[in-house]
Image (cartoon, rainbow, N blue to C red):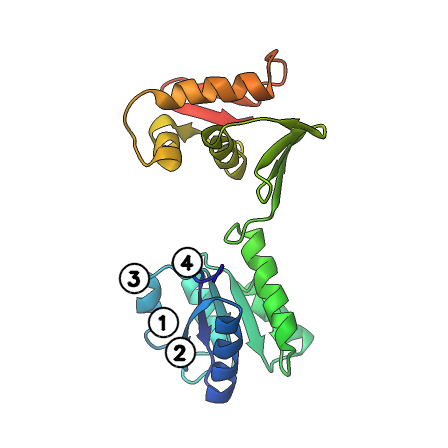
Amino acid sequence: MQNEHIEIVIIEDEEDILELLEYHLQKAGYATIGFTCTQNVEQFLEEEHPSLLIVDRNLPKVEGSKFIAKMREKGHDIPVIFLTAKDTERDVDDGFIRGGDDYITKPFRMNEVLHRIKAILKRVGVIEQNRLKHRDLLLDLEKQVVLIDERVIKLTKMEFRLLHIFIKNAHKPLQREFLLEEVSGDSQGKTINVAINRLKNKIDPDGSKEYIISIWGVGYKLA
Protein backbone atom coordinates (compact mmCIF):
# COMPACT_ATOMS: atom_id res chain seq x y z
CA MET A 1 0.00 0.00 0.00
CA GLN A 2 1.22 3.50 -0.80
CA ASN A 3 1.65 4.69 2.81
CA GLU A 4 3.06 1.50 4.31
CA HIS A 5 6.51 3.05 4.84
CA ILE A 6 4.91 5.80 6.97
CA GLU A 7 4.82 4.81 10.65
CA ILE A 8 2.45 6.59 13.03
CA VAL A 9 2.69 6.27 16.81
CA ILE A 10 -0.55 6.51 18.78
CA ILE A 11 -0.48 7.18 22.53
CA GLU A 12 -4.02 6.59 23.86
CA ASP A 13 -4.99 4.99 27.17
CA GLU A 14 -8.55 4.06 26.11
CA GLU A 15 -7.96 0.76 24.37
CA ASP A 16 -11.16 0.86 22.30
CA ILE A 17 -10.16 4.25 20.83
CA LEU A 18 -6.60 3.03 20.30
CA GLU A 19 -7.88 -0.01 18.42
CA LEU A 20 -10.27 2.14 16.37
CA LEU A 21 -7.48 4.51 15.34
CA GLU A 22 -5.09 1.69 14.49
CA TYR A 23 -7.74 -0.07 12.42
CA HIS A 24 -8.57 2.98 10.29
CA LEU A 25 -4.96 4.14 9.90
CA GLN A 26 -3.85 0.67 8.83
CA LYS A 27 -6.82 0.51 6.45
CA ALA A 28 -5.54 3.80 4.96
CA GLY A 29 -2.17 2.11 4.43
CA TYR A 30 -0.14 3.48 7.35
CA ALA A 31 1.98 1.39 9.70
CA THR A 32 1.03 1.99 13.34
CA ILE A 33 2.30 1.25 16.81
CA GLY A 34 0.18 1.92 19.88
CA PHE A 35 1.03 2.80 23.47
CA THR A 36 -1.43 3.18 26.37
CA CYS A 37 0.90 5.53 28.27
CA THR A 38 4.11 7.46 27.66
CA GLN A 39 6.28 4.81 29.35
CA ASN A 40 8.71 3.33 26.79
CA VAL A 41 7.78 5.92 24.15
CA GLU A 42 10.89 8.01 24.74
CA GLN A 43 13.14 4.98 24.30
CA PHE A 44 11.21 4.02 21.17
CA LEU A 45 11.78 7.49 19.69
CA GLU A 46 15.50 7.19 20.38
CA GLU A 47 15.64 3.97 18.36
CA GLU A 48 13.00 4.49 15.67
CA HIS A 49 11.94 7.39 13.46
CA PRO A 50 8.16 7.48 13.07
CA SER A 51 6.58 10.09 10.82
CA LEU A 52 3.88 11.31 13.23
CA LEU A 53 2.64 11.08 16.82
CA ILE A 54 -1.06 11.09 17.75
CA VAL A 55 -1.26 11.84 21.46
CA ASP A 56 -4.06 11.90 24.01
CA ARG A 57 -3.55 14.41 26.81
CA ASN A 58 -5.43 12.55 29.57
CA LEU A 59 -2.81 9.88 30.08
CA PRO A 60 -1.77 8.08 33.28
CA LYS A 61 1.34 9.32 35.12
CA VAL A 62 2.46 11.95 32.56
CA GLU A 63 -0.01 14.30 30.88
CA GLY A 64 0.32 14.07 27.11
CA SER A 65 1.22 17.68 26.29
CA LYS A 66 3.80 17.79 29.08
CA PHE A 67 5.40 14.67 27.64
CA ILE A 68 5.58 16.32 24.20
CA ALA A 69 7.06 19.49 25.72
CA LYS A 70 9.78 17.29 27.24
CA MET A 71 10.41 15.61 23.89
CA ARG A 72 10.68 19.00 22.18
CA GLU A 73 13.25 20.13 24.76
CA LYS A 74 15.29 17.04 23.89
CA GLY A 75 15.24 17.94 20.21
CA HIS A 76 12.57 15.60 18.84
CA ASP A 77 10.81 17.43 16.00
CA ILE A 78 8.35 14.71 14.95
CA PRO A 79 4.94 16.24 14.05
CA VAL A 80 2.31 15.83 16.78
CA ILE A 81 -1.48 15.78 16.66
CA PHE A 82 -3.21 16.01 20.03
CA LEU A 83 -6.43 13.97 20.06
CA THR A 84 -8.10 14.67 23.37
CA ALA A 85 -11.23 15.48 25.34
CA LYS A 86 -9.55 18.64 26.70
CA ASP A 87 -11.40 21.22 24.65
CA THR A 88 -11.30 24.64 26.32
CA GLU A 89 -9.49 27.56 24.67
CA ARG A 90 -6.80 27.34 27.33
CA ASP A 91 -6.38 23.61 26.67
CA VAL A 92 -5.93 24.19 22.94
CA ASP A 93 -3.46 27.02 23.56
CA ASP A 94 -1.45 24.83 25.93
CA GLY A 95 -1.37 22.05 23.36
CA PHE A 96 0.17 24.25 20.69
CA ILE A 97 2.51 26.03 23.11
CA ARG A 98 3.88 22.69 24.31
CA GLY A 99 4.70 21.49 20.81
CA GLY A 100 1.55 20.30 19.09
CA ASP A 101 1.19 20.79 15.33
CA ASP A 102 -2.56 20.18 15.32
CA TYR A 103 -5.32 19.71 17.88
CA ILE A 104 -8.45 17.55 17.52
CA THR A 105 -11.05 17.26 20.26
CA LYS A 106 -13.13 14.21 21.19
CA PRO A 107 -15.58 13.07 20.00
CA PHE A 108 -13.97 13.16 16.57
CA ARG A 109 -14.78 12.20 12.99
CA MET A 110 -12.38 9.60 11.65
CA ASN A 111 -12.35 11.13 8.16
CA GLU A 112 -11.27 14.47 9.65
CA VAL A 113 -8.44 12.74 11.52
CA LEU A 114 -7.27 11.09 8.29
CA HIS A 115 -7.45 14.38 6.38
CA ARG A 116 -5.43 16.20 9.05
CA ILE A 117 -2.82 13.42 9.14
CA LYS A 118 -2.42 13.65 5.38
CA ALA A 119 -2.19 17.46 5.48
CA ILE A 120 0.60 17.43 8.07
CA LEU A 121 2.53 14.67 6.30
CA LYS A 122 2.34 16.64 3.05
CA ARG A 123 3.46 19.82 4.77
CA VAL A 124 6.56 18.20 6.24
CA GLY A 125 7.34 16.36 3.02
CA VAL A 126 6.61 12.79 4.13
CA ILE A 127 3.86 12.58 1.52
CA GLU A 128 4.77 14.39 -1.65
CA GLN A 129 2.45 16.60 -3.61
CA ASN A 130 1.78 15.48 -7.18
CA ARG A 131 3.18 18.81 -8.34
CA LEU A 132 6.17 20.77 -7.07
CA LYS A 133 6.85 24.38 -8.06
CA HIS A 134 9.97 26.55 -7.90
CA ARG A 135 9.95 29.96 -9.57
CA ASP A 136 8.55 29.22 -13.04
CA LEU A 137 9.54 25.54 -12.92
CA LEU A 138 6.72 23.04 -12.40
CA LEU A 139 7.36 19.33 -11.80
CA ASP A 140 4.44 16.99 -12.39
CA LEU A 141 5.48 13.87 -10.50
CA GLU A 142 2.54 11.81 -11.68
CA LYS A 143 3.13 12.50 -15.39
CA GLN A 144 6.92 12.76 -14.93
CA VAL A 145 7.15 15.98 -16.92
CA VAL A 146 8.69 19.40 -16.33
CA LEU A 147 7.03 22.60 -17.47
CA ILE A 148 8.39 26.12 -17.72
CA ASP A 149 5.67 28.70 -18.35
CA GLU A 150 3.41 25.78 -19.41
CA ARG A 151 5.96 24.59 -21.99
CA VAL A 152 7.05 20.95 -21.60
CA ILE A 153 10.82 20.44 -21.25
CA LYS A 154 12.01 16.96 -22.20
CA LEU A 155 14.36 15.47 -19.60
CA THR A 156 15.92 12.05 -19.14
CA LYS A 157 14.96 10.07 -16.04
CA MET A 158 18.23 11.02 -14.36
CA GLU A 159 17.77 14.73 -15.17
CA PHE A 160 14.19 14.65 -13.89
CA ARG A 161 15.32 12.95 -10.67
CA LEU A 162 18.05 15.54 -10.21
CA LEU A 163 15.64 18.43 -10.64
CA HIS A 164 13.24 16.76 -8.22
CA ILE A 165 15.99 16.55 -5.59
CA PHE A 166 16.99 20.18 -6.17
CA ILE A 167 13.43 21.45 -5.77
CA LYS A 168 12.86 19.40 -2.60
CA ASN A 169 16.04 20.97 -1.21
CA ALA A 170 15.68 24.44 -2.70
CA HIS A 171 18.35 26.93 -1.57
CA LYS A 172 20.33 24.21 0.27
CA PRO A 173 23.91 23.43 -0.80
CA LEU A 174 24.04 19.84 -2.04
CA GLN A 175 27.28 17.88 -2.33
CA ARG A 176 28.09 16.16 -5.61
CA GLU A 177 28.48 12.82 -3.81
CA PHE A 178 25.01 13.17 -2.26
CA LEU A 179 23.41 13.99 -5.61
CA LEU A 180 25.08 11.11 -7.42
CA GLU A 181 24.18 8.63 -4.70
CA GLU A 182 20.56 9.85 -4.73
CA VAL A 183 20.13 9.40 -8.48
CA SER A 184 22.24 6.31 -9.11
CA GLY A 185 23.15 4.71 -5.79
CA ASP A 186 26.81 5.29 -6.61
CA SER A 187 28.94 8.07 -5.16
CA GLN A 188 31.90 7.58 -7.51
CA GLY A 189 32.85 9.33 -10.74
CA LYS A 190 32.03 12.64 -12.36
CA THR A 191 28.77 11.56 -14.02
CA ILE A 192 26.83 14.02 -11.89
CA ASN A 193 28.65 17.07 -13.27
CA VAL A 194 27.81 16.06 -16.84
CA ALA A 195 24.15 15.37 -15.95
CA ILE A 196 23.77 18.69 -14.16
CA ASN A 197 25.29 20.59 -17.08
CA ARG A 198 22.84 18.89 -19.45
CA LEU A 199 19.97 19.71 -17.11
CA LYS A 200 21.03 23.37 -16.88
CA ASN A 201 21.23 23.62 -20.67
CA LYS A 202 17.71 22.24 -21.05
CA ILE A 203 15.93 24.35 -18.42
CA ASP A 204 18.04 27.51 -18.88
CA PRO A 205 19.64 27.38 -22.34
CA ASP A 206 20.86 30.99 -22.37
CA GLY A 207 21.94 30.97 -18.71
CA SER A 208 19.82 34.00 -17.86
CA LYS A 209 17.75 32.40 -15.08
CA GLU A 210 20.57 30.70 -13.18
CA TYR A 211 18.33 28.10 -11.52
CA ILE A 212 21.28 25.90 -10.52
CA ILE A 213 24.48 27.50 -9.31
CA SER A 214 27.84 25.95 -8.44
CA ILE A 215 29.28 26.26 -4.94
CA TRP A 216 33.05 25.98 -5.03
CA GLY A 217 34.35 23.04 -3.02
CA VAL A 218 30.85 21.80 -2.17
CA GLY A 219 28.58 21.13 -5.10
CA TYR A 220 25.42 22.85 -6.29
CA LYS A 221 22.25 24.50 -5.09
CA LEU A 222 18.94 25.59 -6.60
CA ALA A 223 18.71 29.37 -6.41
Quick check: 85 left or right of 31? right
Mark 4 / mark 1, whichever is N-terminal: 1
Q: Residues within 10 Å of mark 1 (few under 14, many from 20)?
A: some
Q: SS of the residue at dot 3?
A: helix
Q: Secondary structure at mark 1?
A: helix
Q: Amino acid at mark 4?
A: His
The x and y percentages for residue 46 are: 31, 61
Q: Which residue is mark 4?
A: 76
Q: Nearer the viewer, residue 54 or 57?
A: 54
Looking at the image, tell me whether mark 3 or mark 4 is earlier in sequence order: 3
SS of the residue under disc 2: strand
Q: Is residue 78 above or below residue 187?
A: below
Residue 41: image tag? 1
Q: Amino acid at mark 1?
A: Val
State the CA–CA distance, disc 4 to disc 1: 12 Å
**According to the image, label 3 marks what residue?**
47
The kind of secondary structure element at disc 4 is loop
Closest to the camera, between mark 1 and mark 2, is: 2
The residue at which mark 2 appears reads as 35
Residue 32 or 96: which is nearer the viewer? 32
Q: Are marks 1 and 2 in contact (CB under 8 Å)?
A: yes
Q: Could you tell me if the residues under marks 3 and 4 are in contact, i.e. CB atoms within 8 Å?
A: no
> Which residue is at the front of the view, 203 or 36?
203
In front: mark 3 or mark 4? 3
Kindly tell me whether residue 199 is visible in this rendering.
yes
Q: In the image, what residue type sits under mark 3?
A: Glu
Label whose residue precedes the other's in the sequence (2 or 4): 2
Question: Please, which residue is most extreme toward the left here?
Answer: 188
On screen, residue 121 versus residue 147, left or right, reads left
- Whether residue 56 appears in this view of the structure is no
